Image: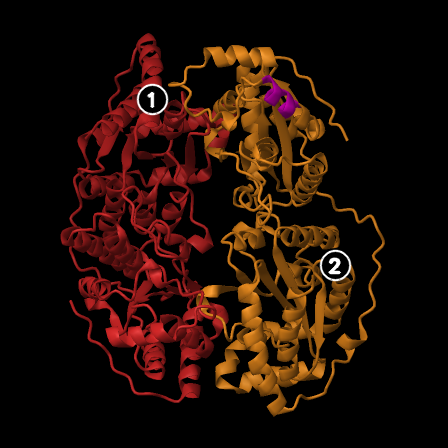
Chain colours: A red, B orange
């Protein structure tokens, strides 16, 4: 798909600036409102083509306080980090505009240009495809992404290198490339052909035209931001609720056998988690009182507290609501912990948010694919994702709720909200069924553990982790 | 000041756990309420004394989901980073408990033990004093800090080193020290004497006693959290409002002279900011419409957008309100930008928060010293803090407000709140006067620019930056 390259006439600076400021404030004022958007501008191109100058000029025409500029030096893509990992914290919140000089494409170019064994074309294209999928998901979650490439001919580049005054321009990093090397320039140009067909390409030759085209393209983008998609396109096929969810096992594990197995398995799980070269994410979901807390206690039993992190996921904060729903999970994975346990997860999007209508139908129906892509990219970057659903019967939940209310050190665990959720029991079963059908991938399968016996559940959770760790 | 070392009897595990959970949930439930607190537990000590095990046991007795554990490897203190910089993002929010294994004291110890030229005692003690001041400020801002040192005799340490099974205990970092070296052990012990007198010291000899003492100390802390201080101890001495604030200059700069000076100064400022080895923070405060935005435009005029960051400070978000008021500024400085411009600042605490009573009297009266310490630590770590107050007359403000309302690309800059703030003009003058008197330090002085002429103000802002950059 090639973007229609828009063309612009030079305009009066004052009028352009006024229009830009109007558009900028309209975006800013959309925050927390129904059709709120943010804009992410990825900027790359040939060195000295003037991207810095164009952004500088844009910042002068806009209110500079509300245009964030991020410029990290490009870094090599790594096999054990997703390409988006280091950038997600700069994803703009509703109402914001962020310019990213350093971005996943500059990393990709650096990697392709620099490494001893260069990326082959297939791998390069695979990266580009992933990047576009990621941007597509951002778009759908109201982060409007635009990409601008600043081009410059070989001749002009050489002329500018002749003129450059190193002492004045020391912030030009020049990407560590030898821009005097024609072969390198040609390689970069041919690489850029492989991904810039959906970019707006600006010729850096004429400074005034360049700055105006850039600013007018941003203006046009701001003025034509698409409305949120609300129309549901497909008829929803509700999945059948698996039998085990309707009738969890009532079989009780012998107490001595439990103790014996538990002791062995906790040790085995700790070792397996610890000595695996990959990072591990354990994602726990299930009905209230199904035993997530108890299971977590057993998972970490033989681990040192410095080895793992537990995230308990509740309702999002306002600043989190202003970003794609996966954003708060991206950020929780940024510390690069070896072992991360989630007590409730991103699946909230297709569970509570679906049921309570916090997400629109379009949004939760789209989320399955988004989540699959998210997990795929984690798995591709040396992370194991173990997804566990704990199911109990509705009767057993009632027993446990009452027990919680009557036991001093458990009564904190039960709130009126838990009883309200219980009224939607069947909705949750339906949502879970759809979730299994659509997100039970080969790289991150679901382990459904359906039993009214707490001890059995704990043993099965530990076994599920071991199984997934050995899965490949 | 030496802490009374509490003594504890061994208790039934079940009862202890119940009490701990009750206390933990009481803290959790305090979030967003009047007497909300958080608890920060700093843990250090002799290797193999069992601090990991003690925290592990605590986590089993508590609800592990609500006890965050942070464990960074100790790093050397550096001359161009404050000791708290890398830790502030882990400062607990109201209702949370955080254990920090890696903390500023372990960094200090590492630095003292490792560097080629070890810290002399005076410098070591100076660091300890700064750390205590920082903790004191945390306490006053409702982060209750407790410090626990795990001790172990030389003999026991050697015995444990004999028994250690490297393959099982690979998460023991052993701090890169040679724990077989008696001299090194003695050095560490004597260094620890210099700062642990306000720590709770636990002997790691007996595992059960150790874990119980640690947990009971935490329990006691949680049960005896002090109430917020509300009593004002000193009679407030309102500073006299400086004359220049009451009568800003009306002198108008000649237009040609302005253009000429502006062009020279923007270039000079850009170079000065760019080539200074230190980081630079420009903090702009002043009355609404006094020209902060216009001044910022001129400061960055000759800079590349990748060289600086602008933070526009509005009302804090809820998650920010759950932490010390300086927290959001600490975090904004974490990216280590070379040049950071603040459009409104941490002085909001003693301006809008004082006037609108968002901060209690005790809180804003205490803030001057806290802010001074904050700025001092920045300046001590190779950062220049340029503080500028822009003053205009009340009549001039009315003129500018009306102009904003009538000019298309400025009307976004004016809101009903601006008119409301205007009604409190005199309160702001009083607050500014107190602020100058109490925070006009030699290391970070105030530049008061009082003029109704926009152009003069812009020139003076640029000169102020140059002056402060050359100040030493």
* Side (left or right) of B307 relative to B371: left
Residue B251 in sight in this render: yes
Image quarter (top left, top right, bottom left or bottom right) of the C terminus of chain A? top left
- Residue B441, label in figure: 2
Count of marks placed on residues:
2
The picture quadrant where one finds residue A400 is top left
Relative to B412, residue A378 above or below: above
The picture quadrant where one finds residue A451 is top left
B186 inside magenta stretch = yes
Relative to B101, residue A329 above or below: below
Please tell me whether mark 1 sits on a helix, a strand or a loop: helix
**Coordinates of residue A122 in the picture (x, y in percent):** 14, 52
A378 or A455: nearer the viewer: A378
Which chain letter matches label 2? B
**Main SS of residues in magenta:** helix
- Residue matched to label 1: A271
B213 inside magenta stretch = no
Residue shown at 29% from the left, 46% from the top: A78
Please tell me whether mark 2 sits on a helix, a strand or a loop: loop
B366 or B48: nearer the viewer: B48
Image quarter (top left, top right, bottom left or bottom right) of the N terminus of chain A? bottom left
The picture quadrant where one finds residue B181 is top right
- Residue B113, label in figure: none
Magenta region: which residues?
B182-189
Same chain for the residues under marks 1 and 2 in the image: no
**Coordinates of residue B206 in the picture (x, y in percent):** 57, 11
Relative to A39, residue B128 above or below: above
Residue shown at 18% from the left, 64% from the top: A190
């Amino acid at each position: 798909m090639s973007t229609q390259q828009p063309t612009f006439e030079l305009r009066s600076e004052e009028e352009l600036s006024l229009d830009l400021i109007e558009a900028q404030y309209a975006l800013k004022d959309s925050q927390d409102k129904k059709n709120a958007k943010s804009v992410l501008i990825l900027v790359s191109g040939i060195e000295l083509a003037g991207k810095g100058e164009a952004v500088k000029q844009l910042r002068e025409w806009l209110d500079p306080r509300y245009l964030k500029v991020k410029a990290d030096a490009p870094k090599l893509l790594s096999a054990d980090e997703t390409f988006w990992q280091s950038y997600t914290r700069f994803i703009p919140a509703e109402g914001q505009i962020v310019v990213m000089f350093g971005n996943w494409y500059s990393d990709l170019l650096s990697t392709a240009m620099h490494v001893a064994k260069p990326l082959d074309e297939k791998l390069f294209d695979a990266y580009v495809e992933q990047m576009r999928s990621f941007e597509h998901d951002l778009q759908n979650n109201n982060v409007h992404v635009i990409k601008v490439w600043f081009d410059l001919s070989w001749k002009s580049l050489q002329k500018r290198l002749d003129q450059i005054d190193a002492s004045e321009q020391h912030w030009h990093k020049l990407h560590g490339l030898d821009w005097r090397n024609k072969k390198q320039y040609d390689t970069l140009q041919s690489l850029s052909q492989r991904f810039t067909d959906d970019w707006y390409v600006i010729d850096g030759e004429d400074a005034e035209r360049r700055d105006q085209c850039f600013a007018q393209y941003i203006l046009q983008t701001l003025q034509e931001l698409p409305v949120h998609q609300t129309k549901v396109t497909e008829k929803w096929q509700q999945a059948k609720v698996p039998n085990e969810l309707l009738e969890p096992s009532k079989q009780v594990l012998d107490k001595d056998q439990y103790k014996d197995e538990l002791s062995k398995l906790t040790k085995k799980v700790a070792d397996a988690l610890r000595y695996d070269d990959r990072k591990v994410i354990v994602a726990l979901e299930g009905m209230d009182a199904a035993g997530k807390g108890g299971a977590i206690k057993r998972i970490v039993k033989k681990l040192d507290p410095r080895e793992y992190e537990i995230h308990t996921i509740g309702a999002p904060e306002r600043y989190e609501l202003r970003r794609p729903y996966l954003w708060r999970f991206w950020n929780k994975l940024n510390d690069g912990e070896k072992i991360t346990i989630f007590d409730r997860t991103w699946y909230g999007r297709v569970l509570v948010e679906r049921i309570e209508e916090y997400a629109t139908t379009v949004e939760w129906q789209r989320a399955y694919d988004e989540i699959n892509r998210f997990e795929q990219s984690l798995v591709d970057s040396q992370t194991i994702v173990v997804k566990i659903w704990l199911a109990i019967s509705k009767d057993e939940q009632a027993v446990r709720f009452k027990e919680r209310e009557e036991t001093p050190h458990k009564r904190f665990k039960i709130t009126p909200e838990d009883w309200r959720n219980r009224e939607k029991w069947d909705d949750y079963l339906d949502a879970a069924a759809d979730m299994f059908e659509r997100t039970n991938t080969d790289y991150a399968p679901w382990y459904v553990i359906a039993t009214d016996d707490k001890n059995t559940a704990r043993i099965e959770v530990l076994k599920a982790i071991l199984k997934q760790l050995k899965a490949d």
